[in-house]
Image (cartoon, grey):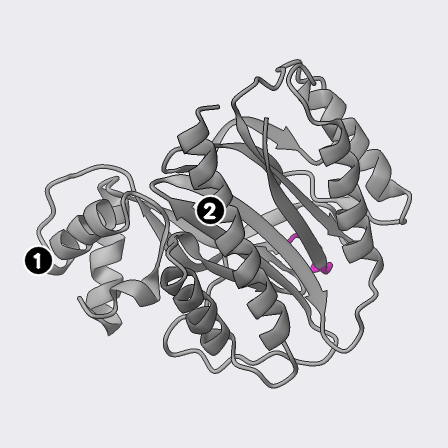
């Protein structure tokens, strides 16, 4: 990996770690989810980073892709299992990290399982290691805690301005023979649950991503498309980030049009299929 690129990753890592510490400090009973998102995202920008995606704040059975909207009144409650997923980039080089905190009780079997599995995976990751070997270590570690991995969520490669790149690294055993290569950035991402071990899409979507320019009728849709492509640099963005363009029904119609024509990809909120609780741990590794 080029030394200048490594420096950018390391700067993104430093900013990510500062943001994680701030989030851990602020997560407490009664605190607003929206306020946390605003505070942490502001911290990232003020420290010289850019947001690779909106701050994900997923609670209990919600596994991923939840970020608060401007009209939410959601607050943290005692015993909530809170997952914080933070993406920071410098010039497109992304540091992807996540942690879970249980409010009112720091100890939780699922959190410990995900953290121990991360540690086990990190120890073995190096060029030449196969995806199936990593997945085997992850699932076998998690099983020791009497919980399950989420089988249809996985770790992934990171490329410039691309959060989810090849290879995918499942949380469950498989036969994938792809070998990790020197110079890759890999996000080791582990989800554990006391539910069925699968997630499903819900009807709510709060995060979108630019795909391509297409002709659209709505002026609001055209403005959103330009902002998604140029300001957000084709990376995932929150619905609340574009409220200055439109709101209410006008915003919903503009987003619907952009999704229908294939200009935007939507990221529906993901929930555990059996309504089990979910914990998450994630870190980025530079090979």
Left or right? Give the position of 80 relative to 116: left
- Assign the C terminus to one quadrant of the image: top right
Residue 276 forms part of the magenta stretch:
yes
> Comparing marks 1 and 2, which lies closer to the viewer?
2
| Of callouts 1 and 2, the N-terminal one | 2
Q: Which mark is residue 11?
A: 2
| SS class, disc 1 | helix
Q: Which mark is residue 265?
A: none
Q: Residue at x 60, y 86 (%)?
A: 30
Mark 1 neighbour class, 10 Å CA radius: few under 14, some 14 to 19, many 20 or more: few
Q: Residue at x 37, y 64 (%)?
A: 46
In this orientation, which residue lies closer to the viewer: 10 or 282? 10
Mark 2 neighbour class, 10 Å CA radius: few under 14, some 14 to 19, many 20 or more: many
Q: Residue at x 58, y 49 (%)?
A: 97
> Mainly helix, strand or loop, the magenta region?
loop
Residue position marked by numbered label 1 in the rendering: 219
The percent coordinates of residue 54 (x first, y second) are: 42, 58
- The residue furthest bottom is 30
> Which span is picked out in magenta?
272-277
């Amino acid at each position: 990996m080029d030394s200048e690129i490594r420096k950018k990753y390391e700067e993104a890592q430093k900013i990510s770690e500062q943001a994680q510490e701030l989030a851990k400090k602020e997560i407490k009973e009664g605190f607003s989810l929206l306020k946390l998102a605003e505070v942490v995202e502001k911290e990232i920008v003020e420290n010289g980073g850019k947001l690779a995606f909106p701050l994900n704040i997923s609670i209990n059975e919600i596994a991923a892709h939840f970020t608060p909207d401007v009209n939410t009144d959601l607050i943290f409650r005692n015993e909530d299992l809170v997952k914080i997923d933070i993406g920071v980039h410098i010039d497109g080089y992304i540091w992807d990290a996540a942690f879970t905190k249980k409010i009112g009780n720091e100890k939780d079997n699922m959190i410990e399982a995900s953290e121990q599995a991360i540690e086990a995976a990190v120890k073995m990751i190096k060029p030449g290691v196969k995806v199936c070997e990593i997945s085997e270590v992850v699932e076998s570690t998690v099983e020791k805690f009497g919980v399950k991995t989420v089988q249809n969520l996985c770790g992934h490669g990171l490329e410039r301005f691309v959060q989810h790149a090849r290879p995918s690294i499942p949380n469950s055993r498989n036969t994938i023979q792809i070998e990790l290569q020197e110079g890759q950035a890999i996000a080791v991402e582990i989800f554990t649950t006391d539910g069925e071990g699968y997630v499903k899409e819900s009807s709510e979507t709060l995060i979108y991503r630019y795909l391509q320019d297409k002709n659209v009728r709505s002026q609001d849709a055209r403005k959103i498309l330009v902002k998604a492509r140029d300001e957000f640099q084709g990376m995932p963005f929150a619905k609340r980030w574009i409220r200055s363009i439109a709101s209410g029904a006008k915003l919903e119609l503009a987003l619907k049009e952009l999704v229908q024509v294939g200009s935007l990809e939507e990221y529906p909120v993901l929930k555990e299929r059996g309504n089990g609780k979910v914990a998450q741990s994630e870190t980025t590794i530079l090979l």
